Image: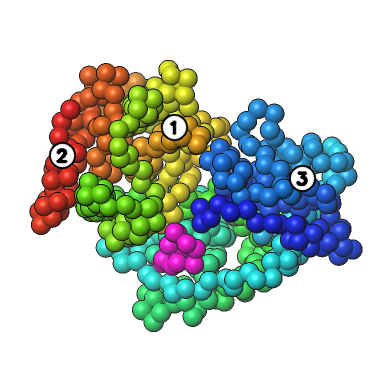
Amino acid sequence: MGAKGTHTVDTTKRLAALRELMASKEHDVQAFVVPSEDQRCAVVTLKEAFLFTDGRYFLQAEKQLDKNWTLMKQGLPDVPTWQDFLSKNLEASTRIGIDPAVISAMDAQVIEKALEPRGSKLVPLEKNIVDAVWTDRPPRPQNPVIHLDEKYSGQSPSEKVKALREELAKKKHQAFVVNMLDEVAWLFNLRGSDIDYNPVFFAYAVVSVDSVELFVEKTQLGADTLEYLAGNVNIQPYNAFFDYLKQLPNNLVLNEEQKVLIGDKSSLAIAHALGKDKYVVAPSPIADLKAIKNSTEIEGFRQSHIRDGAALARYFAWLEEQLENGVELNESQGADQLEKFRSFTCVIPEHFGTPNDEEKRAFTRVLQGHVAIDTAVFPSGTTGFVIDSWARRALWQDGLDYRHGTGHGVGHYLNVHEGPHGIGVRIVAYNNTPLKVGMTVSNEPGYYADGRFGIRIESIVLVREVKTPNNFGDKGYLGFEHVTLCPIQKNLVDTELLTKGERKWLNDYHAETWAKVSPLLANDERALNWLKRQCAPL
């Protein structure tokens, strides 16, 4: 559900075609599920269609869904998750079709167990029937893949493979199947553009004790990238992956203790290809290795955000000048100009005009939550779930809240959303993963008054060690270092609500932003003057 348009599409014919395939003798299913790693899912029965999504997309879904669909607002009272809906709301003995390539083996196992009491069954289909009715679907992208120099990555692929094998040896695993695209990219220091806004490419990999297999279209790899991988990696066609998996157990010495490891996000199709009792499911060891950034990556975060701060200053100075001169700009024109300053598409909220008291109070409450996370100190081993309430406390004092998570991991020239950790109010895996030194995470509390205004104050922070006067339990204590350097709009702040410490934080943050960003604007008087005004102390 992207933001490319808000018009409603008539899905009557699509649903009719899908239901015809569902009811056919070949498939014989009474429901079909289209899951997603994000918080949304479609469930189509022979008579109804449901879209499950969370609070981020309620308004968009209400505008875009046609009369054929029922919106299920996850997180609201009496609204089940799509998993509970399958087991409790559908008729007994329902055959529920699913593409095994788009659901994890672990999730499928949980759902199958929940379906048993009512005699329903999850039915993996050999072919995705949505693909069959999507007659004009674009082909899978096969864009060029580049390699990332070690002066940026800090480690070679061979060093990363060695670290992975050490993790496998600890658990006596014979091989690991790499199915997450960002994990493949990280492992081999490769980057692509097959998926918009994510520098990844379609590929799989298998790392065993004596071989490294990369399944990718060779035409995507240039001569320099092939040379970079030569001698360390066997390159096979992308479509050869599942046939390789079917033979893999025969080529390894497997027993009750020694099996093939697949990550907890590996698809049901991968599990089926390996065969029953040939694999074990556990959190991906690469996820942890990738999440803890090395010194080169950490410095890359710092320097890139200084440059980004300069780009933002140039953009906002330009935008402010246009508006002061009476130039009328729409959002599209503003976005087009932004891309001239920054290297990626993004959303940047900025308020022009005079904010009312309600807006200022809400903004200040969000800012107080942002400061609370930025200045947090906590024992080693603390999870994001534990500290999430610190971001919401000030909002709660006014009876306000937000539906999104407070923070997520951030990749190094990889996906903007990265696990295995996060900060959030829901008790899920990424919020229950202990924060560790070297992890990156976003700090982004917000508030949304539906149909009127929205607020999000977001920074990227690094988890770091903190020296404390004491060390209870010999745990060691952690905190955050912010790397985002962009002025916070002081005209939106109700300074009467701020504590002395919060005022000091804001002045210190702006002083730091000026000190680090202004040298890059020495030849841009307009941007330099804008930054100086924005960073002036309260």
Residue type at numbered disc 1:
Tyr
Q: Is residue 137 magenta?
A: no
Q: Residues within 10 Å of mark 2 (few under 14, many from 20)?
A: few
Which residue is the site of mark 3? 112
- Please tell me which residue is depicted at 20% across the width and 25% down the height of the picture: 504
Q: Residues within 10 Å of mark 3 (few under 14, many from 20)?
A: some
Q: CA distance from mark 1 to mark 3?
A: 38 Å
Whether residue 247 is visible here, answered yes or no, is: no
Residue type at numbered disc 2:
Arg
- What is the number of the mark on residue 533? 2
| Label 3: which secondary element | helix
- Give percent across and percent down for residue 330: 37, 53
Q: CA distance from mark 2 to mark 3?
A: 60 Å
Q: Describe residue 255's horizontal placement relative to residue 95 as left or right.
A: left
Which residue is the site of mark 1? 447
Q: CA distance from mark 2 to mark 1?
A: 26 Å
| Label 2: which secondary element | helix
Residue 444 image-quadrant placement = top left
- Please tell me which residue is depicted at 33% across the width and 53% down the height of the picture: 329
User: Which region of the structure is painted magenta?
Assistant: 190-201
